[in-house]
Amino acid sequence: MVDAEELQRLNAVQLSTGDVLAFLKAGVETRRLTTRSVKHTGVGPAATRFLEQEAAGKAMALLCRMQALADLLHEGIPGFVNEQSGPGVSAYSSTALFAVAAEHPLTLSGNTYAFDRESFLERLLATAESATHA
């Protein structure tokens, strides 16, 4: 259920860029192990694989954050180039994107958890800039 109490629990879970990358790696591994006759779509199989190694609260927080990130990417992030948007140079590294997704607080948006677009983009820019000056 999407509610303020669950939102507070999700935001209290400490996540790192490494957690996000491990979650994504679990998804890639799940797709690799899946035969052509069995089609798995979405993040469910990745979450299941990740759950085998992590606490349920952490996996749920990651799942919600990945969905919120997917929604932002679907809307489009200025300066971010992905495979679907064609060739080009991205203003942000995927590492910066995942770092912000791991730490940025979720908000409620109707019946779903989301990232506040403006504050997410501001944080992404700051993270990308600090990475290039480091």
Image (spheres, rainbow, N blue to C red):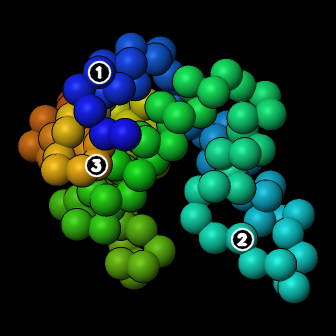
40 left or right of 34? left
Residue 5 tag number: 1
Kind of residue at disc 1: Glu
- Circle 1 packing at 10 Å, graded few (<14), some (14-19), many (20+), is few
In this view, which residue lies farthest toward the left? 118
Residue drawn at x 20%, y 39% as measured from the top left: 108
Earlier in the chain: of badge 1 and badge 3, it is 1
In the image shown, does 74 or 96 lie closer to the viewer?
A: 74
Q: SS at mark 2?
A: loop
Residue drawn at x 22%, y 66% as measured from the top left: 75
In the image shown, does 74 or 122 lie closer to the viewer?
A: 74
Foreground label between 2 and 1: 1
Q: SS at mark 1?
A: helix
- Disc 2: which residue: 40
- Disc 3: which residue: 112
In this view, which residue lies farthest toward the bottom? 37
